[in-house]
Image (tube, rainbow, N blue to C red):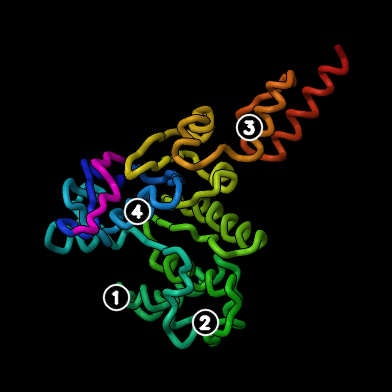
């Protein structure tokens, strides 16, 4: 099971003076169970790319398939394939529209035709997942919540659909560090507990380095790099050309390595970096 793009190209406002090709001849496969981060500079094509994955955009050339089904063919099979892909847009709180938190989260499952009992179960599970107490928040207006709480409600609404593939376009944009960490911790939990495929759009290398097992770097509408984080971060020049940089931890370890410290410069987390530096200093002291 996977999402596959074959020679996908998309041009905004084609055949007008404002024509702009956002993605060019993309060939890509995202397999079930992966945690993929798509990174790149503003305007690199990453948001356009992910809007093809659930059929919001149709490529001018090429095709998009979910679990072997062309998303743009006619019939129930294509509709069912699209429902397997959930999308959380940047600033997802702008998607909220119902009078209560419960009604907003329940909207998607009801549209799927779920029985009332199943809808209730899904709402409760989704609220528990985003750490919103059911009794406290079910009857509240989503527009009376804090920004972080609104973001949780919006994510819960997509989680309640129980998608096989979950796409999030800059879900932490505008949040403070605590709110960002909270959102990302929940995504990691969701991936581990349910094996949901996560596709995360971000420009923050420090965030994605801690979560993703695969990075896709977009540059000028094309995929410039694709692979495990440890491999991607070796290509510093290609990353700079794409308008992104290595994580701060990696940059520090690279400088220490150049300075003569015997450490693994491909470590991705602060805790592992501290252990490596301490161990290296102890070895150096014992010599």
Q: Which mark is residue 206?
A: none
**Among the two numbered marks 1 and 2 on one chain, the one whose residue lies closer to the N terminus:** 1
Q: Which mark is residue 113?
A: 1
**Among the two numbered marks 1 and 4 on one chain, the one whose residue lies closer to the N terminus:** 4
Q: Which residue is mark 3?
A: 267
Which structural element holds mark 2?
A: helix
x and y, in percent, of residue 131 in the image: 60, 69
Residue 19 is inside the magenta segment? yes
Q: Which residue is mark 2?
A: 142
Q: Is residue 89 left or right of 76 when viewed as pictured?
A: right
Label 1 crowding class (10 Å Cα cut-off): few <14, some 14-19, many 20+? few
x and y, in percent, of residue 20 in the image: 26, 53
Residue 108 is inside the magenta segment? no
Q: Which residue is mark 4?
A: 50
Residue 57: which quarter of the image? bottom left
Distance from disc 4 to disc 3, alpha carbons, whole Å, reads 28 Å
Distance from disc 1 to disc 3, alpha carbons, whole Å, reads 47 Å
The mark tally for this picture is 4
Q: Which residues are magenta?
A: 17-28
Q: Quadrant of the C terminus?
A: top right
x and y, in percent, of residue 255 in the image: 68, 27
């Amino acid at each position: 099971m996977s999402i596959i793009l074959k020679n996908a190209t998309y041009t905004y406002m084609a055949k007008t003076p404002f024509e702009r090709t956002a993605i060019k001849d993309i060939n890509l496969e995202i397999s079930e169970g992966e945690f993929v981060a798509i990174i790149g500079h503003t305007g690199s094509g990453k948001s356009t790319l992910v809007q093809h994955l659930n059929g919001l955009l149709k490529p001018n050339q090429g095709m998009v398939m979910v679990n072997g089904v062309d998303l743009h063919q006619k019939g129930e099979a294509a509709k069912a394939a699209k429902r397997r892909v959930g999308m959380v847009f940047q600033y997802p709180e702008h998607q909220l529209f119902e009078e209560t938190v419960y009604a907003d989260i329940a909207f998607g499952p009801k549209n799927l035709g779920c029985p009332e009992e199943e809808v209730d179960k899904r709402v409760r599970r989704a609220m528990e997942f985003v750490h919103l107490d059911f009794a406290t928040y079910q009857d509240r207006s989503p527009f009376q919540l804090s920004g972080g709480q609104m973001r949780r409600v919006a994510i819960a609404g997509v989680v309640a659909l129980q998608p096989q593939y979950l796409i999030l376009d800059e879900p932490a944009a505008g949040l403070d560090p605590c709110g960002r960490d909270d959102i990302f911790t929940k995504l990691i939990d969701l991936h581990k507990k349910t094996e949901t495929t996560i596709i995360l759009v971000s420009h923050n290398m420090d965030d994605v380095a801690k979560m993703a097992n695969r990075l896709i770097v977009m540059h000028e509408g094309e995929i410039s790099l694709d692979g495990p984080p440890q491999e991607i971060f070796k290509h510093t020049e290609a990353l700079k050309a794409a308008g992104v940089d290595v994580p701060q931890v990696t940059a520090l370890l690279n400088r220490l390595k150049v300075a003569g410290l015997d450490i693994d410069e491909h470590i991705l987390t602060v805790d592992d970096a501290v252990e490596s530096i301490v161990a290296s200093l102890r070895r150096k002291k014992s010599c």
